[in-house]
Amino acid sequence: MTGVLRVLCVALLAATLLALAEPALAGLGQPSPWQLGLQQPASPVMHDVVWFHDLLLWIITAIVGLVLLLLVVVTVRFNARANPTPSRTTHNTLVEVVWTVVPVIILVMIAVPSFRIMFTQLNTPQADVTVKATGKQWFWSYAYPDQGKFEFDSLMVPDTDLKPGQPRLLSVDNEMVVPVGKVVRVQVTGADVIHAFAVPSFGIKIDAVPGRLNETWFKAEREGVYYGQCSELCGKDHAFMPIAVRVVSEQAFTAWAEDAKKKYAETPAPVPAAITVAATAPTAD
Ligand SMILES: [Cu+2]
């Protein structure tokens, strides 16, 4: 029995230490081993989301603590042995008003910031750059309508081709490139089935629906590479169509766009191997 208790105590201590060390462990732009909580925020919206998540965590912890305390009091003080003749009280106006009003106040406290963050997410400010992301089975295509109308495909780097420092299942051959500190409008659609465009550090996740143009936005605060994944089950390679956004300085972005315009305008995008295989493979039915 003491052995079990000791293991439990160690586990609890380890979990507490991990939770305390969380900000150091949470990756910027990508998940990290043993990460608890959310990825580090890199956009104003994600800062709000993290703040709201922490607020909810405090509220939910207080509620669980209160309910646990009440249960303990009831089981200790009002069990058949400790309290053989139970009270026959049925109503108490004060208690009933309190347990109605307090939850209402808590819900309003949650609703106000919740709606505020939702409106921030849904209202795209004046955009500096527009990128159209199209989800396809199983990769993403990015188009830059205002930088010369070029479009390119972004496919996952297979395990065998990974270079040092490239995270597995997240790295791509052609990253989506955006300038730092600028409002980037992302227009999202699907070419075949429903996918979803999501980048945790920017706090964005939006469905890519065929025949429909959805819109979201972010403003990256720091340069770096930020990874995300398709977040709507879209078929057998759903887990292998990552999103990689490279945030660079404005000059670097302009230079990249000039190069990309030439690179992607002249050669028609090759059909990825996965598509050719899928198209020629015999179907089950
Ligand atoms: Cu998917």
Image (spheres, rainbow, N blue to C red):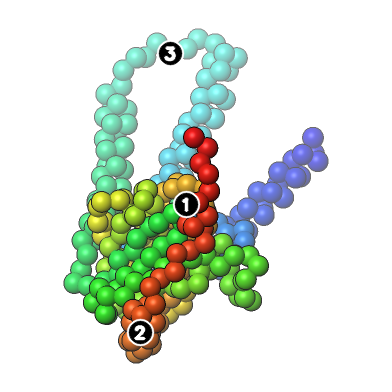
Whether label 2 lies within 8 Å of ligand 1 gets the answer no
The disc label shown at residue 262, or none: 2
Q: Secondary structure at mark 2?
A: helix
The disc label shown at residue 87, or none: 3
Residues packed near mark 3 inside 10 Å, few (<14), some (14 to 19) or many (20 plus)? few
**Residue 88 higher or lower than 182, as above or below:** above
Residues packed near mark 1 inside 10 Å, few (<14), some (14 to 19) or many (20 plus)? few
The amino acid marked with disc number 2 is Lys
Task: Using the rendered view, name the quadrant where residue 257 is placed.
Answer: bottom left
Q: What residue is at 62 percent from the left and 58 percent from the top?
A: 34
> In terms of depth relative to the viewer, which is nearer, 64 or 136?
136
**Residue 90 higher or lower than 43, as above or below:** above
Mark in the foreground, 2 or 3? 2
The disc label shown at residue 279, or none: 1
Residue 172, image x, y percentages: 50, 69
Mark in the foreground, 2 or 1? 1
> In terms of depth relative to the viewer, which is nearer, 212 or 231?
212
Q: What residue is at 58 percent from the left and 72 percent from the top?
A: 166
Q: Secondary structure at mark 3?
A: loop
Residue 165 appears in the picture as rendered: yes
Residue 224, image x, y percentages: 46, 77
Left or right: 170 with respect to 15? left
